[in-house]
Image: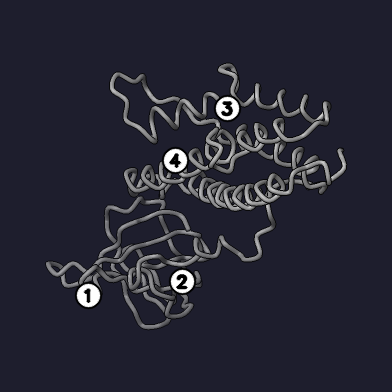
Amino acid sequence: MPDKKEINKKIKEKFEKLCNEVFTLRLRWKVFQAFLKILQSNEKLQILSTFAVSSIWNAFMYDLAIGLRRTLLDKDPRSISLLSILYDLIKKIEDRDLIYEAVKDIKNLESKNSIFWRLKYIVDKYIAHYDEGRKPQREIPLPDLFKKQDELIRKWRFKIIGEHLVNSTPVVQEEFQEIFTVPWLKGTYPEPEKLVTIVNVDYSYIKLSNGYTFFVDPSLPKDFRWEKGDEIVVFESYNYNKVQNSYILCNLTKKQWIKATHATCLGSWVWIKLDDC
């Protein structure tokens, strides 16, 4: 590593700003990975609204792809990117080994055979612009790109700043996944009233320890049976006009959901199976 005095102070300042941008981008990548894990482990989310899921997915993908292109490949000298800093570096230093490393990475970043060119092509042709006659969109190789970004940032932080990073993803100081553990629509799924048990059950109804009685929908599978003593959590569910329109029961013993919807024509509650808890 060259002596710190050999590196222009302005280059160091630009690289520090670049690192801050990279750290923020990698935190967004970490949030996206958490979202992806939740999505892949819950089939119900994929079934409920494919449009909503694909919209959130695309928003994440486009934001991350643009961020990667901006931090790595923006060649404009007025911009702060790894490529512009490397070009600046070879003009203002005399260390041949460092110049060699910079030129090698510049060629890699600009090569049409590299993963970086693929990123630039996708962002320019499909995200930033809507080009006429373009071919079907290619997949954005985000995991590989973030791995390459990490390697380059750690390498040049050591060479320019003199600091060694284990990785370029900061530690999150808060439990950002907590937002996925609570209902997002106010009043749709309120907190459970209390834990109750089944005190009586037969083929046509189930009675709970809180006094509620629910009549069994004959369309439920014959092998679907809740039993006396099963622990139940009762939720009240509301529609968008803030009118109660159903109960949601979660059988903690059987690990199954039931939605009990009021049927005015029958004057009773009928059951509709939802999904496993």
The structure's colour scheme is one colour
Q: Amino acid at mark 1?
A: Val
Task: Say if mark 4 contacts mark 1, CB within 8 Å.
Answer: no
Q: Nearer the viewer, residue 96 or 57?
A: 96
Q: Nearer the viewer, residue 40 or 273?
A: 40
Find disc 3 in the rendering and name its residue: 116
Q: Amino acid at mark 2?
A: Ile
Residue 164: percent from left, percent from top: 82, 46
Q: Give the distance between the C-alpha atoms of the residues marked 4 and 1, in whole angstroms.
A: 39 Å
Q: Quadrant of residue 7?
A: top right
Task: Say if mark 3 contacts mark 4, CB within 8 Å.
Answer: no
Find disc 1 in the rendering and name its residue: 243
Task: Say if mark 1 contacts mark 2, CB within 8 Å.
Answer: no
Q: Nearer the viewer, residue 224 or 112?
A: 112
Q: Amino acid at mark 3?
A: Phe
Is residue 97 placed above or below 205 in the rendered structure?
above
Q: Give the distance between the C-alpha atoms of the residues marked 1 and 2, in whole angstroms.
A: 23 Å
Q: Residues within 10 Å of mark 1 (few under 14, many from 20)?
A: few
Q: Residue furthest left?
A: 265
The secondary element bearing badge 4 is classed as: helix
Find disc 4 in the rendering and name its residue: 62
Q: Give the distance between the C-alpha atoms of the residues marked 3 and 4, in whole angstroms.
A: 15 Å
Please tell me which of labels 4 and 2 falls first in the chain.
4
Task: Point out which mark residue 191 bears.
Answer: none
